[in-house]
Amino acid sequence: MADWRERAPQAIALGRIGFGVALVVAPGLAGRLFLGRECSRPSVRFLCRIFGGRDLAIGLVQLRALRSGDARALASALWLGAGCDAFDAAAAWRGRELPRWGRVLVALTGSATAGVGAAAALGPPPGPDAAAA
């Protein structure tokens, strides 16, 4: 059975791609979970689409690196995502004007995915079975 550090990169990449697509396609709906009623504003939906595009792009880069079997490329892609997630978490903790539930959700999710991504980047390179999974 594969170690969690071999399964985590694919789970992170696919989750990021799914979340990114949701924010790009339906920013008002996807963003409402953490931004509440603010997502009814056109400017907020626009920013949700931007962040959705960022997550979609990072997820695709992570998935490509995973499938290439290049351990250094995968570690770099995981560090990129972990850095973005850590920044999101820090911004959420400071975002006093956001709904409390959204702040907690983004801060905890960002912290968790940053930690798992960083641990996976530091872990052993994925085996040949990880890319085929």
Image (cartoon, rainbow, N blue to C red):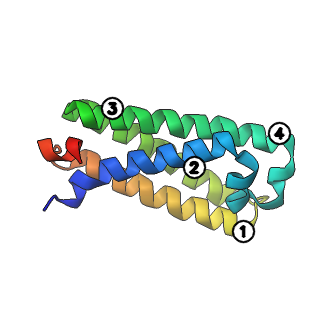
Residue 90 horizontal side relative to residue 124, left or right = right
| Mark 1, other Cα within 10 Å: few <14 / some 14–19 / many ≥20 | some
First along the sequence among labels 1 and 2 = 2
Q: CA distance from mark 4 to mark 1?
A: 21 Å
Residue 68 horizontal side relative to residue 40, left or right = left
Q: Position of residue 24 (x, y in %)?
A: 65, 39
Q: CA distance from mark 3 to mark 1?
A: 36 Å
Front one among 112 and 58: 58
Q: Any mark on residue 64, and which? A: 3
Q: CA distance from mark 3 to mark 2?
A: 23 Å
Q: Amino acid at mark 3?
A: Arg
Q: Position of residue 60 (x, y in %)?
A: 42, 34
Q: Position of residue 122 (x, y in %)?
A: 23, 47
Q: Amino acid at mark 4?
A: Ser
Residue 127 visible from this viewpoint: no
Kindly state the secondary structure of the residue where label 2 is placed: helix
Q: Any mark on residue 120, and which? A: none
Classify 87 as above or below 116. above
Task: Give the residue pinned by disc 2.
Answer: 88
First along the sequence among labels 3 and 1 = 3
Kindly state the secondary structure of the residue where label 1 is placed: helix
